[in-house]
Image (tube, rainbow, N blue to C red):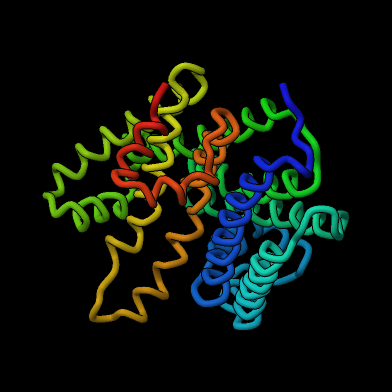
Amino acid sequence: MTTFSLQDTRRSYVLLLLRIAVFCLLAGRAWQHLFWDAPFRTVLWSEDLLQWFVEGTLGYSWQSYVTSMRTDAIIQGTIRGFGVFYALGAVLTLLAQPGKWRRGISLFYYVTVGALTLLSLFYMKEKFYQWGQFFEYASQVGAPLLFVYFLYRSFREQRMLLAIKVMIGLTFLCHGLYAFGYYPRPGAFVDMVINILGVQENFAHKFLVMAGIIDFVVVVLIFIPGLAKPALVWAFIWGTFTSLARIVANFDATFFASTLSQWWWETVLRASHAILPLVALYIQYGLRIEKVSTWLKRPGAQSAGAKELVAG
């Protein structure tokens, strides 16, 4: 096993990929919180969770609490505050450099991981405590942690590779649980398949079942040395497709600005779903990202590059 150093050329390319993933994630979450909404009210207006506190500690009746304009303003202000926090994080991600302001920047990203974990819990509550909803965000929650570790710390390559694969595996496993139908299949999944492929609803459901099965297979294969490479290549392709599907399926040129505002962040915040498999490929197989530009300049570069990528 090897240990990365800050001078390692390979590390610099991995850091670039993670920088892109984390910037996209935080920029997307910032836009969501500043201009749209986040599921804070799912928890803060949950009678079964907070009635005892509101009535017993704050001294308000539950009815007055949930109908209060002041309460709503505080919740909305909190959401906007998180949006500002994520926006600052996106800017910091572009500026952070190895060896500079290590303690302060590390603390910021640890708090970011905590905020994203809290958001995942809120989404889980919104989905009636389905744990699959929580762990589906593993790649998004883990990306900032990976970034700060690659930025400042030394570690064993194989341990980091295992951590990345666990994040990928959890994301694909939980996505597969929804696509397959273990949990109620989201209508948004069905609509995206229909809108992109132009198929009937019955076919869309069958397509999603197959997609779920493939997700489960990928989760297993990424941990098998002889089969990990094609599985990670597929994870990169599928992660890219499912991220782009949000804006492709819902984009309306007639309402260009409004649909772009509503859906671009849904796409970019999922960048880690594609980038983490690429990082795993680079760490495990030494995929030469620095040669991509050379491939693209050669005749037949795309087919040659694809063959080199998936070769056992």
Residue placed most toward the observer, 63 or 306: 306
Q: Is residue 237 above or below residue 191?
A: above
Horizontal side, residue 212 vs residue 112: left or right:
left
Q: Is residue 104 visible?
A: yes
Q: Is residue 119 above or below residue 205?
A: below
Identity of the residue furthest to the front in this view: 298
Q: Quadrant of residue 39?
A: bottom right
Residue placed most toward the observer, 236 or 178: 236
- The C terminus, quarter of image: top left
Q: Which residue is drawn at the image coordinates 82% and 55% (left, top)?
A: 107
Residue 243: % across, % down: 40, 53
Q: Is residue 121 visible?
A: no
Question: Looking at the image, how many numbered discs can be counted on the residues?
Answer: 0
Q: Quadrant of residue 64?
A: bottom right
Q: Quadrant of residue 154?
A: top right
Residue 135: % across, % down: 54, 40
Residue 21: % across, % down: 56, 54
Q: Which residue is drawn at the image coordinates 77% and 43% (left, top)?
A: 7
- The N terminus, quarter of image: top right
Q: Which residue is drawn at the image coordinates 36% and 33% (left, top)?
A: 182
Horizontal side, residue 60 vs residue 20: left or right:
right
Residue placed most toward the observer, 240 or 42: 240
Q: Is residue 127 above or below residue 234?
A: below
Residue 114: % across, % down: 71, 52
Q: Which residue is drawn at the image coordinates 33% and 39% (left, top)?
A: 179
